[in-house]
Image: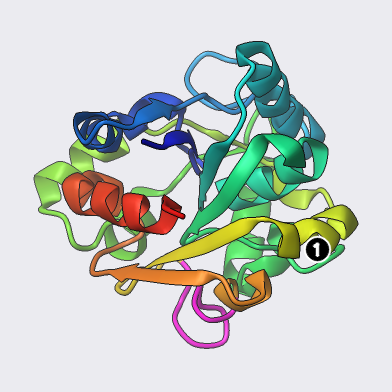
Amino acid sequence: MTEFVLIHGSWHDGALWEPVATHLRDAGHTVHTPTVAGHGVGVDKAVDHADCVASIVDWMLEADLSDVVLLGHSYGGTIIARVFEEIPERIRRLVFWNAFVPAPGNSLLDEVPPHYRELFSQLAAASDDNTVSMPFPIWREAFIQDAPLELAQSTFEQLSSEPFQPFVDKLPLTRFYELLPTVGRSYINATEDTALPPGEWGWHPRMSGRLLGARLVQLPGSHEVMFTAPALLAQKIIEAGRD
């Protein structure tokens, strides 16, 4: 069976993977869901992208994990790309689920449409701690539009503010792209994901195409199908993660 390390996206923490992780464990797999530095409630938000990456690298080294399938969701794609640069020998396959695969030298902010750049910058400037809190209308209409209102509201209440500096930091990713042909790689695409608007700014094929012939696994659903269809997402993670 497979050992999965699941890296969450923005406004999330590791605990929010639990519905998906339960299905993966029930299928016989080992699953880890660490929380990236600066994420979650009541933690220090004064982190940069390097701090976020180091928190996962250090956690994997301390746990002495190897031969893992490392999955990143959304912002988590930027984390797993950098973790792979640091400890490629411990990773068997990379899986990006509707995740950012930044072009060399870009930040996450470079990879989102101008209206998001402006909004996130304004929200961070208006905060007391340089963080971005998710507005409910965007969550409801662009991130989890396939959920009943009650589920959209209950999941929104579990979100936490997002450190802004990791959005801004430029990521050279030279080693990532050099090493990419040496590792298994997959891209999971939820076909109704509108967190990035379809077309010029869409996830697939813009992000998936940067992975040089990655396995493509698709499923119906929104950006937050981890909440709306966790069993199906777990099935697709297994498909994406197998040799």
Q: Amino acid at mark 1?
A: Tyr
> Please, is residue 54 above or below residue 204 in the view?
above
Residue occupying the point 73% across, 33% down: 53
Instruction: Look at the image and say whether residue 38 sits in the magenta stretch.
Output: no
Residue 88, given in percent of the width and then of the height, sits at 75, 42
> Please, is residue 210 above or below residue 151 in the view?
below
Q: Which residue is mark 1?
A: 177
Looking at the rendering, in which quadrant would you find the N terminus?
top left
Q: Secondary structure at mark 1?
A: helix
Residue 137 visible here: yes
> Please, is residue 61 above or below residue 111 in the view?
above
Instruction: Look at the image and give the residue range highlighted in magenta.
Output: 196-206
Residue occupying the point 87% across, 54% down: 175
Q: Nearer the viewer, residue 137 or 87?
A: 87
Residue 43, given in percent of the width and then of the height, sits at 58, 15
Image-quadrant location for residue 4: top left
